[in-house]
Image: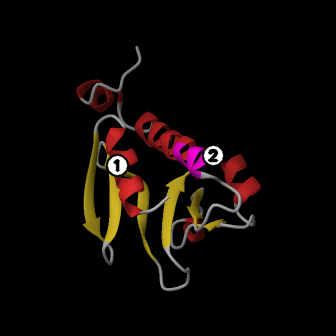
Amino acid sequence: MDEAEFNAFCGTLPATSTVVQWGDAHVWKVGGKVFAVGGWSKDIDGFGISFECSPLTFEIYKDEPGMRPAPYLASRGMSWLQWTGPQTLDTDMLRDYLGESHRLVAAGLTKKLQRELGLATD
């Protein structure tokens, strides 16, 4: 997945916003909370995509080819992975995990904000 595909996909998820920050990274948010970050990193060759995941998913993928604990975020005890290439997750699987990251972050918003954003399921 390249930068254009990443931004196009994240833009299809409900109630999202984006900002370019942190050294030209594309930061995607739901309800003001980050769920995905895409950008270049000096220690990888190409475009990396970081996303929140469950602790189990983190443990399964953190040492797999094309994956690693997300710089900064994972070192602070958060379950965030960085995709660096398609060796383990192809584009379709990556989209699924980005959608799951969006869902996890949205679920952590207040019920009031979820309703305001049209994300409440009740």
In this view, the residue farthest toward the top is: 122
Which residue corresponds to the image point at 57% horizontal and 44% vertical from the top-left? 92
Q: Quadrant of residue 117?
A: top left
Within 10 Å of the Cα at label 2, are there few (<14), some (14-19), or many (20+) other Cα atoms?
some
Position of the C terminus by quadrant: top left
Q: What amino acid type is highlighted by mark number 2?
A: Ser
Report the magenta residues as a range.
91-95
Q: Position of residue 89 (x, y in %)?
A: 65, 54
The dominant secondary structure in magenta is helix
Residue 85 appears in the picture as rendered: yes
Q: Position of residue 55 (x, y in %)?
A: 67, 50
Q: Is residue 104 above or below residue 1?
A: above
Residue 53 appears in the picture as rendered: no
Q: Position of residue 41 (x, y in %)?
A: 47, 79
Which residue in the protein does label 2 denote?
54
**Does dot 1 land on a helix, a strand or a loop?**
helix
CA gap between label 1 and label 2 equals 24 Å
Q: Quadrant of residue 30?
A: top left
Q: Quadrant of residue 15?
A: top left
Which residue corresponds to the image point at 33% horizontal and 63% vertical from the top-left? 26
Which residue corresponds to the image point at 50% horizontal and 68% vertical from the top-left? 48
Q: Is residue 56 above or below residue 61?
A: above
Of the pair 117 and 85, the residue shown nearer to us = 85
Which residue corresponds to the image point at 29% horizontal and 27% vertical from the top-left? 112
Within 10 Å of the Cα at label 1, are there few (<14), some (14-19), or many (20+) other Cα atoms?
few
Q: What amino acid type is highlighted by mark number 1?
A: Ala
Mark before the other along the chain sequence, 1 or 2:
1
Q: Are marks 1 and 2 in contact (CB under 8 Å)?
A: no
Which residue in the protein does label 1 denote?
8
Of the pair 98 and 56, the residue shown nearer to us = 98
**Does dot 2 land on a helix, a strand or a loop?**
loop
